[in-house]
Image (cartoon, rainbow, N blue to C red):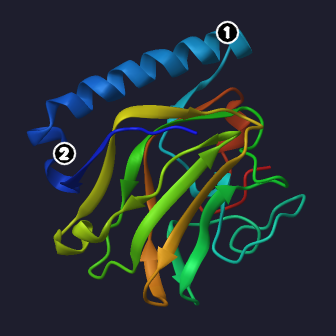
Amino acid sequence: MGQGGFIFAELDSVKRQYPDFARAFADLELHVIDKCDADWKTWAGRTTILPPLFRGFGQTAATPPVAGTNCLQHFRQHLTSTGQQTLLTGALTGNVIPEDFKIAWMGLAFPNKQMNISELKWQISDGKYVRVNIEELMSYNKPALVFEKGYIINEKESFDLYGNVENADYQRIVPLGACYYRVIDRVLGAPGSAIA
């Protein structure tokens, strides 16, 4: 079990008003680069956190995954039922992140006009993290949950994000941070396509 610190913030003011975020992300980036160097010896680069690395609400694993059916094409999801729901998981069977990818995760943005989620909890591999009530974010224009210290989600490691859905509706749940990849061909596909 674990507990991490976080702040609620307006997404567009995080970098401007929270210099600790920039320092925390720089520290996380150093750690993930060290991990990439140690695990992969050679690796290709860094990009944004890509939706096809995850499955969303109501999606089941399949090999190979089909974009929009077995992995996300974008972070906008149609949440069709209320109560505790699985919101994001690793794309592959066992809810794992695909091989050759590592994620430096610094938080979540919810760029909706309406916030439909009131509480979150997550699990990375065998690490379970405490529930976080995010109702305060409902009063923000561009809400974000930003971690004081980020997490590394490794390749072939399970990831689960659960939430309490108050209103069945569309919701964007956008992970903040960066994605590091070992093989460039894995990220050269068409935008919105599954990662093979």
Q: What residue do we see at 34% from left, 39% from top?
A: 5
Quadrant assignment, res 72: bottom right
- Name the N-terminal-most of marks 1 and 2: 2
Query: Which residue type does callout 1 highlight?
Result: Ala
Query: Which residue type does callout 2 highlight?
Result: Val
Residue that mark 1 sits on: 38
Taking the image as shown, residue 12 lies to the left or right of residue 132, namely left
In the image, residue 194 lies at what x, y percent?
72, 58
Q: What residue do we see at 81% from left, 62% from top?
A: 65
In the image, residue 62 lies at what x, y percent?
87, 64
Q: What residue do we see at 31% from left, 46% from top?
A: 146
Quick one: SS at disc 1?
A: helix
Residue that mark 2 sits on: 14
- Residue 105, compared with residue 163, is above or below; it is above
Quick one: SS at disc 2?
A: helix
In the image, residue 25 lies at what x, y percent?
34, 29
- Residue 70, compared with residue 38, is above or below; it is below
Taking the image as shown, residue 71 lies to the left or right of residue 63, namely left
**Residue 120 marker:** none
In the image, residue 88 lies at what x, y percent?
60, 62
Q: What residue do we see at 56% from left, 52% from top?
A: 122
Quadrant where the N terminus sits is top right
Taking the image as shown, residue 177 lies to the left or right of residue 88, namely left
As drawn, which residue projects farthest toward the left? 17
- Residue 88, compared with residue 189, is above or below; it is below
Within 10 Å of the Cα at label 2, are there few (<14), some (14-19), or many (20+) other Cα atoms? Answer: some
